[in-house]
Image: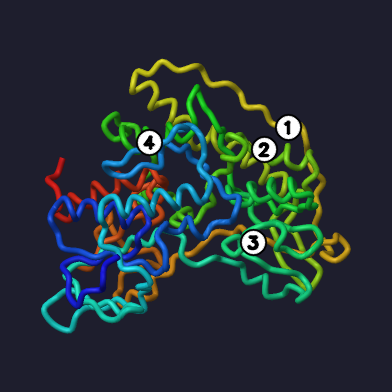
Amino acid sequence: MTTLPRRVDTVVVGAGQAGLTMSWHLQRAGREHVVLERRATLGGGWQDRWDQFQLVSPNWTAGFPDAPYDGDDPDGYMPRDEIAGRVARYAATIGAPVVLEAGLDRLRAAAAGGGFVLDTAQGLVEARQVVVATGGFHRPHVPAIADGLAPRVCSLHSFDYRRSADLPAGAVLVVGSGQTGVQLVEELRADGREVYLCVGTAGRAPRRYRGRDSFFWLWSLAERGEALGVTLPSVDKLPDPRRRLAANPHLSGHDGGHDTDLRQIGQAGTTLLGRLSAIDGERVRIVPDLHANLAIADRFYEERLQPTVDAFIAAAGMECPPAEPRAVADFEPPIVEELHLGQAGIGTILWTTGYRPDLAWIELPITDEMGFPRQVQGVSEVPGLFFLGSLWQHDQTSATLFGMPRDARVLAERMGLVARA
């Protein structure tokens, strides 16, 4: 590993996929730089996932510049330790100048002459440029209503969850029906737990559509969509900036990959509920919106993504099987408006309620009212300060394994590391 220098041309913050990809671009351009990593080991944020975590995107998406996926199961879905190991090995492969255990306390403007000063756990470093590559999942978000929960009940965010055996005895109430929530419901049920699930407005997506994994179409739109005039909405085209925090549509990479259907999950024994509205000790009040939320999930793909994918297929002149109607389980769960946790035997509430940006350590006016960096294609309003891997940096694929490399190429052009295409 590298020793923290006193001065350097460029500092990259974060040694996950985004930071290492930027290191690759900087090396090719001959730019002096270091990569700061707050953890003691390489592997990026994947190291923070639970034990049975698996990628939702296929293995072939887990490539790096000059290092595409080279395993024997491109259409499988990697477990946590394999993807973390690939990140660590890539750092070694490219000889990235990583400084471990160098978490940041402050990033501020230098007193004179431009540039920045970074206060790290290993001391100060001055830099002409900084690339913040800390991803989009900073601070685990637990709603304020959790403060009213009885002390008896274990309250745990999915960030801190590792395995079912660690939880207290009893049923588990999972709050949030995005990718993480639905996968953890399946895991808990397989372990023999009774599970309740609070269903929000996250959609469902098919594992495969028109003969290909759904992520193939998202990758195609990110890489080729602009040239064909068919693209996903960019961040500036969102009808509501709050959509940047919307949960990803649910599907699974477990057991070889499969669709997830909330109605089927309910039919198989999970108790489905609407959104939580209040908690008073053991009593939980629930919004009677379950049926509406299930309907939103059922039609999400057909309304939001399928037309764009179909338009891409047509523009690319691809021959693909026709779309097939997706089966929806014939199950309409009862509406529950109040639940007593003790009477239901619930010992744990597992919050799969996402994350919020946390850039408070940057002592510069660069965040909007929601805490996201103000940037265009990774270039901030502060000269010399850049971002890579942020949620919705460009579109919904920006923080994914396959969308971030495109954003990195664009940012490298904007930084003058490579000639514009």
Q: How is the image coloured?
A: rainbow
Tags 2 and 1 in contact by the CB under 8 Å rule?
yes
At label 3, counting other C-alpha atoms closer than 10 Å, the crowd grade (few under 14, some 14-19, many 20 or more) is many
Q: Mark 2 vs mark 1: which is more N-terminal?
A: 2
Indicate the quadrant where residue 168 lies: bottom right
**Residue at image coords 24%, 67%:** 11
Instruction: Work out whether 9 lies above or below 47.
Output: below
**Residue 62 against residue 273 in the figure, above or below:** above
Label 1, label 4: how far apart the Cα atoms are: 38 Å
Residue 182 in the image: x percent, y percent?
Answer: 64, 47
SS of the residue under disc 2: loop
Q: Which mark is residue 329?
A: 1
**Left or right relative to 261: residue 98:** left
Q: CA distance from mark 3 to mark 4?
A: 36 Å
Identify the mark nearer the N-term, 1 or 3.
Answer: 1
Task: Kindly identify which numbered label has been placed on residue 261.
Answer: 2
Q: Nearer the viewer, mark 1 or mark 4?
A: 4
The residue that appears at 40% across and 42% down in the rendered structure is 62
Q: Amino acid at mark 4?
A: Asp
Q: Residues within 10 Å of mark 2 (few under 14, many from 20)?
A: many
Disc 3 designates what residue?
351
In the picture, the quarter occupied by the C terminus is: top left
Q: Earlier in the sequence, mark 1 or mark 4?
A: 4
Distance of label 1 from label 3 (alpha carbons)? 26 Å
Task: Say whether disc 3 or disc 4 marks the residue closer to the N-terminus.
Answer: 4
Indicate which label's residue lies in the foreground, 3 or 4. Answer: 4
Callout 4: helix, strand or loop? Answer: loop
Disc 1 residue type? Ala
Q: Which residue is mark 4?
A: 70
Looking at the picture, tell me which residue is in the foreground, 330 or 219: 219
